Amino acid sequence: MELTIRTGFGYDVHRYAEGRELWLGGIRIDHPIGLSGHSDADVLIHALCDALLGAANLRDIGYHFPDTAGEYKDIDSKLLLARTMQLLDEKGYSFGNADCTICAEQPKINPHIPAMQQKLAEVMQTDPDRISIKATTSEKMGFVGRMEGMSAYASVLICKKG
Ligand code: MG
């Protein structure tokens, strides 16, 4: 029996890096330290893409956008998200909702959440109310707590069209 609704889960992590811009949830946050990565290192978008791909059983972000490919060097992750939505559409799925968590000691994420919801909703052509973004620290424990980097988790629901 074919499922009419499916869930997906995504996780990503990026290391802090001096001299890089900080891109998170599709927006640039003014902060002295950014994240290192082959793309713009938007850890939230990457977790979200993986959740969407996983829900549709379409492998993962590294499969579709390999970091060995020159075309993805420093790429705006919003383009990867838009392409991911296209892949879902081609497989006959529409987006339901997403619930995401960013785990970071710095900077303060909460003031930026409405702008991230708005930007991601634009890219995904959906309502901002369908995209929940939450933030937490790691209580100074582990690699996030030692401020080596940040991580993000995403859970999504997708629906079979028609
Ligand atoms: Mg990544």
Image (cartoon, helix red, strand yellow):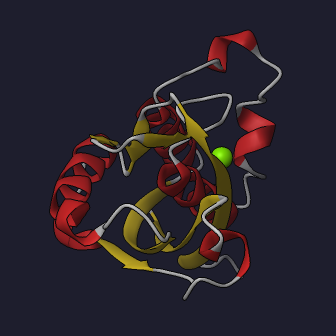
Residue at the extreme bottom: 139
**Camera-side residue of 66 and 14:** 14
Q: Is residue 21 left or right of residue 84?
A: left
| Picture layout, residue 38 above or below residue 149 | above
Residue at the extreme top: 70
**Camera-side residue of 77 and 18:** 18
Q: Residue at the spot x=57%, y=21% of the render?
A: 74
Percent position (x, y) of residue 132? 31, 75
| Picture layout, residue 161 above or below residue 136 | above
Q: Can I make out residue 162 in this image?
A: no
| Picture layout, residue 111 above or below residue 120 | below
Q: Residue at the spot x=23%, y=46% of the render?
A: 119
**Camera-side residue of 122 and 134:** 134
Q: Is residue 63 left or right of residue 19?
A: right
Q: Residue at the spot x=80%, y=39% of the render?
A: 63
| Picture layout, residue 36 above or below residue 60 | above
Q: Residue at the spot x=73%, y=35% of the render?
A: 64
Percent position (x, y) of residue 5? 52, 79
Percent position (x, y) of residue 11? 66, 66
**Camera-side residue of 83 and 35:** 35
Percent position (x, y) of residue 156? 50, 73
Report the quarter where the N terminus lies. bottom right
Q: Can I make out residue 86 in this image?
A: yes
